[in-house]
Image: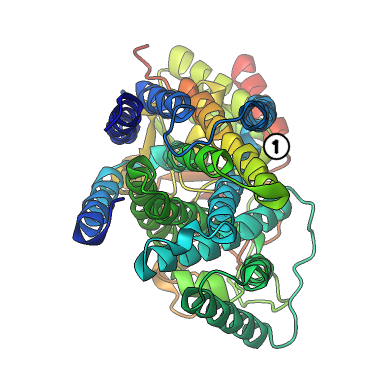
Amino acid sequence: MSFWEFTVDASYFIAAVLFIIGLKRMGSPKTAKSGIKWAGIGMALATVVTLWHPAMEAGFFRYVLMILAIVIGGAGAWYTGKKVEMTAMPQMVALYNGMGGGAAAAIALVEMYSGSAFDHGTTVLTLAVIGALIGGVSFSGSLIAWAKLEGKMKKTIRLPGQQLINGSVAAITVILGIAIIASDGSAPVLVTLFFLLSLAFGVLLTNPIGGADMPVVISMYNAFTGLAVAFEGFVLGNAAMIIAGTVVGAAGTLLTLLMANGMNRSISNVLFAGFGVDDGAEADGPEGEMKSVEAFDAAASFAYSDSLIIVPGYGLAVAQAQHKLWEFVQMLEKEHDVDVKFAIHPVAGRMPGHMNVLLAEAGVPYDKIFDLEEINAEFPNADAALVIGANDVVNPAARTDESSPIYGMPILDVDKAREVYVVKRGKGTGFSGVQNALFFGDNTRMVFGDAKQVCTDLANGLKQL
Amino acid sequence: MITGFVALYIFMLAAFTGYEIIGRVPAILHTPLMSGSNFVHGIVLVGAMVALGHADGFWETLIGFIGVILAAGNAVGGYVVTERMLEMFKSSKD
């Protein structure tokens, strides 16, 4: 083993260790900040030593190209990553993830076109082919997911016989993949066709899925990319890629399942059922009179409460009201001695934990923010609950009404608080199209208006007391 | 080359590691963690560099070049957004 071979392998080993430590540290709010830095050091180390990788062929032009590509990709991502709004984070993660999937597919293509993927036996070749397939699907699928969440693809196009078309494309792609594995590597046309079909499959699979389900899909593609990277790691004999890719593949799969559970859906349901899109059907719901009050009255009521639990939803973030809300909460705590907690549903925001990020951006400390399991027992003892921009996640029908489409979904038991205030733009229904029984409850008061305006009015209301 | 059962062992152990790391994480960190794991598979950059490093001819070189651009975007973008999100988390004691 030469000096550089040893140095490269040793560095990859250190990088793999740093990735695992980094991810582990990212699992707790106290250590999370250092976690990403540990992982970052691993990445920098692995990248730099790769310039001396034994498989590199010499050539000034080659190195210029390599550095140029790193600078182009890195600078572009640096700029967009610094600039992106926190509300747009899910689609940005999708975009970067798709790039990783595309890179894994590119590696597979180079290795297959050059024939080196065919030199190490059938197992390695099979992994190269599977890696190319899921890398390609992740690439095109993530781009579609990004475009949809970014609002660049407003219409959800469903072809007649979508499942049949998807199934056929998948079957042809797999057959081509098997043909590549059976071939001796002298048919680059097969490889090209195979790759193009895998891209098409990613588009077909993602396109019919509605925006509400997209976070689950993004998480799934994140796991896909991880696996694709691991498989190409086997092809290149690169242990750092195998370990990092597999760890992400497993972690991403678990995260995807957690998300789907939070929405009371199965993965296959998300992928093939096409829920989350309005199909025009009106669901029957509770009827009655909603009691509406002014923000000033709500503010007065909160000021004389001992405890308040706030349930923020994505509507809060869309209205950019989180800063105003936090200002109001600080006044409540300091001047009126109210104990305020934030309760977050697992699917609040656009992906699990997204709402936490949005509240953190406004300056809310994480120890005031509670998960569903932690907080649900506290609602019966709370003087007041304030729901802002959330709907389905506080609908008691999920507990009681077996005919409801959201029956069985875990919800925040807001209706058990002594008084409930709901801030809402209008009288419409939520994502699921279901009317919310909470709004008609005896202890519920509606504050109609834009979330940001209402939060401003709440704060002004306190000042007038 | 890492082949046969050694490869399988590495794969199996790494999969368990990934599962265990995420299993006990509070939901508050799911978004940054998804973004963080997205950064970690940016390690595909080293593979893309090696692929470009031994690519022959125009097309292989072009694909390798695009691969490195994409991979660098994955790694750098993943790092930047994860760090930005985590920087915002603070305790009321801070």
* Above or below for B65 versus A28: below
> Residue A2 occupies which quadrant of the picture?
top left
B91 vs A138, nearest the viewer: A138
> Residue A402 occupies which quadrant of the picture?
bottom left
- Residue B18 is situated, as x and y percent measured from the top left of the image, at 29, 48
* Above or below for A60 versus A165: above
- Residue A256 is situated, as x and y percent measured from the top left of the image, at 43, 57
Q: What residue type is disc 1 on?
A: Ala
* Above or below for A277 versus A365: below
The residue positioned 49% from the left and 39% from the top of the image is B42
The chain to which mark 1 is attached is A
- Residue A418 is situated, as x and y percent measured from the top left of the image, at 41, 45
Number of residue marks:
1
Which secondary structure, mark 1? loop
* Above or below for A352 versus A176: above
**What residue did someone put label 1 on?**
A319
- Crowd band around label 1 with a 10 angstrom C-alpha radius: few (<14), some (14–19), many (20+): few
